[in-house]
Amino acid sequence: MDLTAQNISKTAPAAPMIDPFGRAITYLRVSVTDRCDFRCTYCMAEHMTFLPKKDLLSLEELDRLCSTFIDKGVRKIRLTGGEPLVRKNIMHLIGSLSRHIEADRLDELTLTTNGSQLSRYAEELAACGIKRINVSLDTLDAEKFKTITRWGDLAQVLRGIDAAQKAGLHIKLNAVALKGFNDHEIPDMLRWAHGRGMDMTLIETMPMGEIDLDRTDQYLPLSMLRATLSRQFTMTDIPYQTGGPARYVQIAETGGRLGFITPMTHNFCESCNRVRITCTGTLYMCLGQEDAADLREPLRASTDNALLSDAIDDAILRKPKGHDFIIDRRNNRPAVSRHMSVTGG
Ligand code: SAM
């Protein structure tokens, strides 16, 4: 397999795609696999049925898809999953996509990972021009970590974080805020993260896919958590942006940044610059809506990218205004049937 042989388009970067609400689409999230080596309770059921491997796009096809989006003005790509680092030969894809950073056609190539494979891949990721990664970590308590991830090993993730920092990667820690599970631990996690030079972001749990638990038991509005944190920390809103949905504060006591991703209490759809593709080539224009476009067929229909490009244009014209997630006792159903592991975080 030689992904590096794929051509870089020599044309100047395109003007970004614009959706019907005037939003420029410059950020693509790519789920490279629906499989994961963890089974986080809020994300997946314990016994998941995964896609047959034959339905997955090949690494070459994923590369072509990403490169076409770059041709159409995308400047940031995040690889996610499932767990992106468990996809076989994933470093081939990352190495290949890094040519777009070198060519100044992409501002950032990054990934969201559970950290389990970082000890193995940190050096290679840094060598591919990856500067920052997000590591999902909901607790620093080994027992609780086992409970929430079902299959994960905290020590392995911490070794991965060490390896990534040693390789020079900047890490942002992502924690899903879960009522009665990690809310009391967040101040300590924050001090730990900031003490190691890592930013941290808190995420509200979203009603995506059937899980084995009741989401109303887990859901914690970040407005409440923020109010609790403000008793211990001096928080100042700052305009810091990473191109994603988090809104940041600076914490005076630690000198670090804390982000809030609040899809439930305050949706951020008016500034949405993102679309997502799954590992089978389905394009979702909104994380919280069912409408999607199949890109695999136009991708496979010809070696020329014209059909694919037209299919992307059509889909962007259908990007909805936003999502309408609700979690309460009366609406105790997933807002969308697919799990987060399908479209990625
Ligand atoms: N395996 C990788 C990881 O753990 O980061 C990438 C995929 S994972 C689906 C991406 C992020 O989505 C993780 O931070 C995870 O905690 C978060 N997530 C999963 N299900 C969620 C849900 N229902 N609501 C909010 N966040 C969720």
Image (cartoon, rainbow, N blue to C red):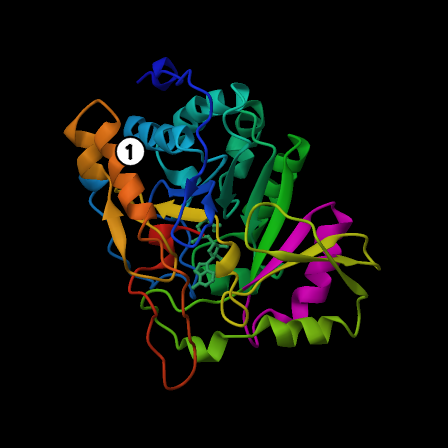
Q: In this view, does 261 lie above or below 35?
A: below
The three-letter amino acid code for the residue at tag 1 is: Ser
Above or below — where is 2 with respect to 271?
above
**Does residue 193 show up magenta in the picture?**
yes
Question: What residue span does the magenta drawing correspond to?
Answer: 177-203
Taking the image as shown, residue 204 lies to the left or right of residue 44, namely right
Residue 34, image x and y in percent?
32, 48
Residue 271 within the segment the image draws in magenta? no
Residue 161 placement (x, y as % from top left): 61, 42
Front residue of 147 and 231: 231
Identify the residue at horizontal 50%, vertical 45% (top origin): 112
Can you name the residue that lies furthest to the top here? 5
Q: Mark 1 points at which residue?
A: 309
Give the image location of residue 186, x and y in percent: 67, 65
Q: Check the image and name the residue furthest to the left.
A: 301
Q: Can residue 219 be seen in this view?
A: yes
Residue located at (70% from left, 53% from top) = 239
Residue 21, percent from left and from top: 43, 55
238 to 222, vertically: above or below: above
Judging from the image, what secondary structure is the residue with disc 1 in? helix
Q: Can residue 34 be seen in this view?
A: no
Left or right of 24: which side holds 169? right
- 275 left or right of 143? left
